[in-house]
Image (cartoon, rainbow, N blue to C red):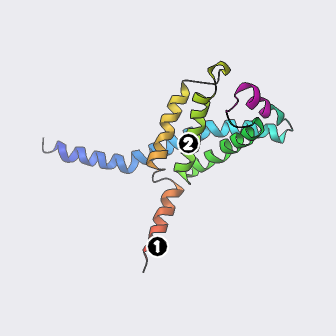
Amino acid sequence: MKLLCPLYFKTIKLSNITLSPLLDLAIRLFMANIFFKSGWLRLQDFFNGQWSNQITAFTDYHPLPLLPPEVAAIVGTGAEVILPVLLVLGLFTRVSAAGLLIMTMSIQFLIPEDYGVSNDDHYLWMMLLAVPMLKGAGMFSADFLICRFGRRFCCKK
């Protein structure tokens, strides 16, 4: 029994040092991929002169309450392109994850079910986005490096 206890704690420590940061990174990459693909498709409409498709989408297919379709299209597209990039870099991770979480919650809960955009996958996405929002990005991130550098820079005498 005495042999198992130290082995258990060494395993936990090793997991916290290696596996937990890798899981944090995997969650960030997985979620960023989903949103960036969607945002890139929207952005392609803009580049191809078909931005009216996005206005139509926010008018007819998934209107957001309190936002005019023109504004919703710009904000939605910008958020789906910028926030995933920040999430991958691990830069302003909590804010990025919160933004994507709010976007997912809006799609799931604010758009009427008649429009058919609610999806059970959104619950998984919300859970996964809550991890970096609550925990931060982990070791493999710009946030981690900035904190580490900032602490050294600020604490030097």
Q: Residue at x 66, y 48 (%)?
A: 82
Percent position of residue 142, x then y: 54, 57
Considering depth in this image, is 32 or 5 the residue closer to the camera?
32
Above or below, 1 against 111 in this view is: below
Extreme residue in the top direction: 114
User: Residue 65's quadrant in the figure?
Assistant: top right
Measuring 57% from the left and 47% from the top, which residue is drawn there?
96
Q: Residues within 10 Å of mark 2 (few under 14, many from 20)?
A: some
Residue that mark 1 sits on: 154
The question of residue 134 being in magenta is answered with: no
- Which residue is at a point 61% across and 36% down the rendered structure image? 34
Amino acid type shown at disc 1: Cys
Residue at label 2?
29
Q: Earlier in the sequence, mark 2 or mark 1?
A: 2
Q: Secondary structure at mark 2?
A: helix
Total numbered circles = 2
Q: What span is colored magenta in the figure?
A: 54-65
Front residue of 16 and 155:
155
Q: Crowding near pointer 1: few (<14 within 10 Å), some, many (20+)?
A: few
- Nearest the camera: 94 or 143? 94
